[in-house]
Image: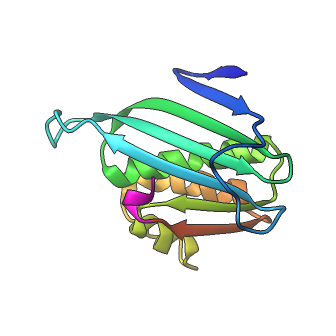
Amino acid sequence: MIYMINRGVFRYSHNPSSSFRFTGTPNTVRCYTDASIDPDVSQNSPKTAGLGIFLQDQAKNCNYYVKLRMDNITSVVMSEAAGLAIAATITSRLGFQNISFYTDNQLLVNYLNGADHSRPPSWDSKPFTQKFINLNHGKRVQIIKIPSHMH
């Protein structure tokens, strides 16, 4: 199945023989996010970012893949935070309560795992980090740093 999300694509697959293997707790959903910014645009102007989200639901033995393009991105941290916020929206709508989010952005991992959410790593990321925090309130959530080469 393929669903359209704005200008992105949402794919659902039920594939027991998938090459991705889940090694965590059976009720944990793994969510991998990544973002990239168009390098050909001037540093001072808004950019276009590509966002990728991959979810593994071990309980249902299925995977979800989301690929989006987002305009008016002003920093790498903002694009990574947007990816996490969209991932949190999807996991909330799917009703997941026990989620491990994986990102390669150490600044966001430190900020979202910290107790003080008054100073985001970049102010343009604040709406996205706040949405992520709000959507995951009351859930069992981990935010884990994954090396960039592991994507």
Question: Is residue 43 left or right of 144 when viewed as pictured?
Answer: left
> 11 and 115: which one is in front?
11
Image: 43 above or below 81:
above
* Tally of marks: 0
> 17 and 42: which one is in front?
17
Which residue is found at the position 73% from the left and 68% from the top?
24
> 132 and 34: which one is in front?
34
- Quarter residue 28 falls in: bottom right
Image: 45 above or below 61:
above
Image position, residue 135 (x, y; %): 70, 53
Residue 120: tell me if it is visible.
no
- What's drawn in magenta, residue-wise? 147-151
Question: Is residue 21 left or right of 37 when viewed as pictured?
Answer: right
Question: Is residue 25 left or right of 5 when viewed as pictured?
Answer: right
> 141 and 12: which one is in front?
12
- Quarter residue 11 falls in: top right
Image: 95 above or below 130:
above
Image position, residue 5 (x, y; %): 61, 24
Most distant residue in the front direction:
17
Image position, residue 67 (x, y; %): 52, 32
Residue 123: tell me if it is visible.
yes
Which residue is found at the position 40% from the left and 50% from the top?
78
Question: Is residue 137 left or right of 33 when viewed as pictured?
Answer: right
Which residue is found at the position 37% from the left and 58% from the top?
149
Question: Is-magenta flag for residue 49?
Answer: no
Q: Main secondary structure of the magenta part?
A: helix
Image position, residue 34 (x, y; %): 45, 48
- Quarter residue 119 falls in: bottom left
